[in-house]
Image (tube, rainbow, N blue to C red):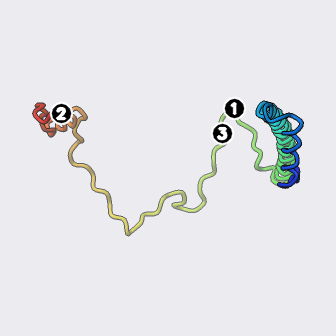
Amino acid sequence: MFDIGAIELLIIVIVAVVVIGPKDMPMAMRTAGRWIGKIRKVSAHFRSGIDAMVREAELEDMQAEWNKRNAEIMAKHPEAVRPAHDGEAPALPEPAVEGAGQVPADPQMEPVAEATEPAAPVDAQISGAEAAKPADNGADR
């Protein structure tokens, strides 16, 4: 932003030390730092406001473009718009090809064997897990 080189900065520091004095220099630097911080906050707030306005304008343009294309599509394909029948969805047509809509059988897959025994209840599994744990008698401590 500002193109201040090392020589310019050195001249500013020397003038500041002569004018302000070395005793009051730390307080002046703190005050300058606070002002710079406030200026940065205000500029960041201003920049974020501008960015938000640009995003809103872009969204409005995108919405207008979408509405325009949607209207073009609806004009080209009016059969896609179907009125609702008493709140029910219209029935879909049946497939024209025999067997359409069915998953073809894969000859490479093996049939899954069905379970012959019912699964054990959860309580039985827990009691079996508790029985498998070694007893803690506190001798290891």
Q: Residue 8, image x and y in percent?
A: 88, 52
Q: Amino acid at mark 3?
A: Ala
Looking at the picture, tell me which residue is in the foreground, 119 or 103: 119
Looking at the picture, tell me which residue is in the foreground, 23 or 134: 23
**Between marks 1 and 2 in the image, the one whose residue lies nearer the viewer:** 2
Tag 2–tag 3 contact (CB < 8 Å): no
Circle nearer the N terminus (2, 3): 3
Q: Residues within 10 Å of mark 3 (few under 14, many from 20)?
A: few
Asked which quadrant contains residue 136, the reply is top left
- Residue placed under numbered mark 3 in the picture: 89
Asked which quadrant contains residue 33, the reply is top right
Q: At x 23% / y 35%, what residue is drawn?
A: 121
Residue 127: which numbered mark, if any? 2
Looking at the picture, tell me which residue is in the foreground, 101 or 23: 23
Against 104, is 75 above or below?
above
Q: Residue 10, image x and y in percent?
A: 84, 50
Residue 59: which numbered mark, if any? none
Cα distance in 3D space between marks 3 and 1: 9 Å
Q: Element under label 2?
A: helix
- Residue placed under numbered mark 1 in the picture: 86
Asked which quadrant contains residue 120, the reply is top left
Cα distance in 3D space between marks 1 and 2: 56 Å
Residue 36 visible, this orientation: yes
